[in-house]
Amino acid sequence: MMQAIVVHEYGEPEVMQVEEVETPQPADTFVLVKIQAAGVNPVDTYLRTGIHAHAPELPYTQDRSQELMLSSHCATRNISVTFPKM
């Protein structure tokens, strides 16, 4: 199990709840990266309120921008981080 910020309804910051979720299991060609800290992008506030044109379906995990920020190449393996779909 791991902790994730999960949003079950659109609204103010109080709608963000830290919950225990299943730890994703990486496929053979992927690795699992533990994130110690994550920043909040200004667009995250618009997604949380539901007013953004690309607001995610509920429930969702906060800060999916980590997927793009953590994509890189390490030695001979590609590393891509994905978050559990709620």
Image (tube, grey):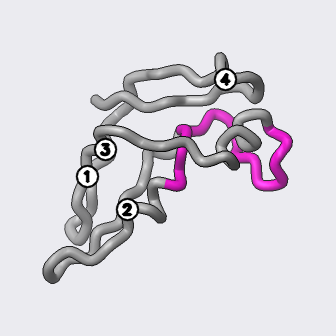
Determine the secondary structure under disc 1.
loop
Secondary structure predominantly adopted by residues drawn in magenta: loop
What percent of the width, then of the height, locates residue 15?
A: 66, 21
- Is residue 32 shown above or below 37? below
Q: Earlier in the sequence, mark 4 or mark 3?
A: 4
Which residue occupies 55% across, 42% down? 40
Which residue occupies the extreme left position in the image?
A: 75
- Is residue 26 shown above or below 5? below
What percent of the width, then of the height, locates residue 11?
A: 76, 25
Q: Residues within 10 Å of mark 4 (few under 14, many from 20)?
A: few
Which residue carries the number 4 mark? Answer: 13
**Disc 3, disc 2: CB below 8 Å?**
yes
Which residue carries the number 3 mark? Answer: 35
Q: Residues within 10 Å of mark 2 (few under 14, many from 20)?
A: some
Which residue occupies 27% across, 77% down? 73
Q: In the drawing, does residue 15 fall left or right of residue 24?
A: right
Determine the secondary structure under disc 4.
helix
Q: State which region is magenta.
A: 50-65
**Disc 2, disc 1: CB below 8 Å?**
yes
Tell me which amino acid carries mark 2.
Leu
CA–CA distance in space, label 4 to label 2: 25 Å
Which residue occupies 66% across, 23% down? 13
**Disc 1, disc 3: CB below 8 Å?**
yes
Which residue carries the number 2 mark? Answer: 70
Quadrant of image for the N terminus = top left
Task: Specify the label residue 33 is tagged with.
Answer: 1
